[in-house]
Image: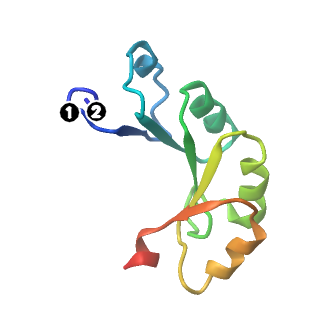
Amino acid sequence: MALKLNLDGAYIPAFNKSYEHLAYSLKKNFKIIGSAHNFKEIKIKENQNVEKIFLSSLFKKNKNYLGIYKFKILSHLTSKKTVALGGISTKNIRSLKLLTNIDFAGISYFE
């Protein structure tokens, strides 16, 4: 669909395990990003040839809660750029310094 709409990229959620998009020829600067919650999903995203992997949830205590240390371990298990996601706020933003070379994203942080 992203190709039909002539978009610059696509997001592949953690539950999407399809490799169908690899059959298409993509324009030069087309970016594919994806999300993962565990090691198995990280490997799937690598095989899907994503550029960046959103790992969640860093701080938000839900069923996918990782916390700082598990996040750090998982982010070192891939050569892809990782992005911290989930529960990032002004109260815990300083904790991101414990993570090296990490991007972050968050809806509540920017509201």
> Pointer 1: what residue?
5
Number of other residues with Cα within 10 Å of mark 2, as a class: few under 14, some 14 to 19, many 20 or more: few
User: Quadrant of the image for the N terminus?
Assistant: top left
The residue under the point 50% across, 41% down is 34
The residue under the point 47% across, 68% down is 106
The residue under the point 72% across, 39% down is 79
Structure colour scheme: rainbow
Position of 91 with respect to 101 (left or right) is left
Position of 55 with respect to 100 (left or right) is left
Counting from the top left corner in percent of width and height, residue 107 is at 41, 69
| Amino acid type of the residue that numbered disc 2 sits on in the rendered structure | Ala
Counting from the top left corner in percent of width and height, residue 73 is at 79, 52
The residue under the point 59% across, 86% down is 91
> Pointer 2: what residue?
2
Position of 53 with respect to 3 (left or right) is right
User: Quadrant of the image for the C terminus?
Assistant: bottom left
Counting from the top left corner in percent of width and height, residue 94 is at 68, 81
What's the distance in space between the residues labelled 2 and 1, CA to CA?
5 Å
Relative vertical location of residue 98 with respect to residue 34 in this rendering, above or below: below
The answer to whether marks 2 and 1 mark residues whose Cβ atoms lie closer than 8 Å is yes
Picture quarter containing residue 32?
top left
Q: How many marks?
A: 2
Counting from the top left corner in percent of width and height, residue 74 is at 73, 48
Relative vertical location of residue 19 with respect to residue 64 in this rendering, above or below: above
Q: Residue furthest left?
A: 5
